[in-house]
Amino acid sequence: MSMTTTQPPVPGPETGSAENNLTSGALPNRFPLVLLVASGMVVAGVLAAFSSFGVVLWALLTGVAYTVILVTASVRIEGRRKATDRLVTALVYSAFLLAMAPLVSLLYTVAGYGIDRFDWYFLTVSMNGVLPSMDAGGVYHAIVGTLAITGMATLISVPIGVLTAVYLVEYAQGRLKKVITFFVDVMTGIPSIVAGLFVVALWMMLFGPGNTNGAAGAISLAVLMIPVVVRSSEEMLRLVPRDLREASYALGVPKWRTITKVVLPTSAAGLTTGIMLAIARVIGETAPLVLTAGSSAVSINWNLFDGQMMSLPVFIYSQFRMGGTVNYERAWAAALTLVLTVMLLFILARVIGRLFAPKSR
């Protein structure tokens, strides 16, 4: 009887070694942060020495220096795989910061120029009886007009847009669906001035020339809002799982009740976000309101159907057009008011979306 012994395998290319190449070396956890701070300080010192320091140039050179040094160190210590990961991560963060730069610059500029005149007096008085050269007056009448016109436009466009989206997702088929989708896409690209001219022509046919008021402005904004509401609502409704609809149908619930009790509540948060995007799309429009609501109103007007009505974007345009230091200050303060109004509307939309969203346990 012969006995055979099995020799242990010799480590080679097939079996590998005890050391894992992926974890053979690693940079310290705080190295990227320290490198970023050091790169910023060195670049700032070099630019200051050459008297060419600028925030944009400093940020650009700091990002390039940080990326090059980090990737080079990672290749030498951690290997090519980890270095590639760090390079892609740095590029993604750079793209994010590049996209945020215009927004931050815009907010900083508007706040910097508008904060001097932005106070309670400016928000609670109108321009009634105030000459352009006088250091007085406020934007209250424009706030009233913006909220009234945008509110009426929302009341018109949201039911039409949401119901159209429900029809496209739940009922429409064949050629009619394609036709509706085509015209919605066409309306999405309509310039705002064209919407204003359309309403002017409609108003002239119905009430005669020269009859401008807030209602005409609201209709022109509704023309711009409807396709945005339709498109965003359609996408949100398509995200509702088909299983929820089928479960409701299996219980004998009719289709219309399934839509109102299952589909719409499930997509409530997304629908609210889409509606707010549509409002943000039109709340800053100037051209259609100049044509339809007028640009010379200086007093407070709560009636959408009686006389011209001022709005924040038209007020900003008119103040810049007149020129002068006082008018420029009022325009920047009105721009800050408009930005804050949009921010408050978005916060309100988030709260409403949370209240109407389906509760999960």
Image: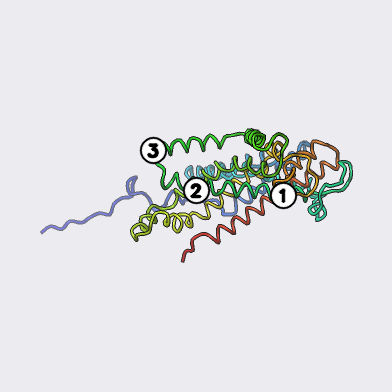
Q: Say if 162 sits above or below 184 in the image.
A: below
Q: Give me the disc on residue 163.
A: 2
Which amino acid type is shown beneath numbered disc 3?
Gly
Q: Is residue 189 left or right of residue 175?
A: right
Which amino acid type is shown beneath numbered disc 1?
Asn
From the top left corner, tell me how far across and down residue 291 is, in percent: 70, 36
**Mark 3: which secondary structure?**
helix
Q: Which image quadrant is residue 50 in? A: top right
What is the spatial separation of the Cα atoms under label 2 and label 1, in whole angstroms? 28 Å
View extreme (bottom): residue = 361
Q: Is residue 66 left or right of residue 48?
A: left
**Mark 1: which secondary structure?**
loop
Q: Give me the disc on residue 59.
A: none
From the top left corner, tell me how far across and down residue 69 is, in percent: 60, 42
Q: Earlier in the sequence, mark 2 or mark 3?
A: 2
- Few, some or many C-alpha atoms within 10 Å of disc 2 (few <14, some 14-19, many ≥20)? some
Q: Give me the disc on residue 174.
A: 3
What is the spatial separation of the Cα atoms under label 3 and label 1, in whole angstroms? 44 Å
Residue at the spot 43% in from the left edge and 36% down from the top edge? 178
Of 219 and 6, the residue lying toward us:
219
From the top left corner, tell me how far across and down residue 323 is, in percent: 83, 37
Q: Earlier in the sequence, mark 3 or mark 1?
A: 3
Residue 315 visible in the shown view = yes
View extreme (left): residue = 1
- Few, some or many C-alpha atoms within 10 Å of disc 3 (few <14, some 14-19, many ≥20)? few
Q: Give me the disc on residue 303.
A: 1
Mark 2 touching mark 1, by CB under 8 A? Answer: no
Q: Say if 321 sits above or below 116 in the image.
A: above
Q: Say if 327 sits above or below 342 in the image.
A: above
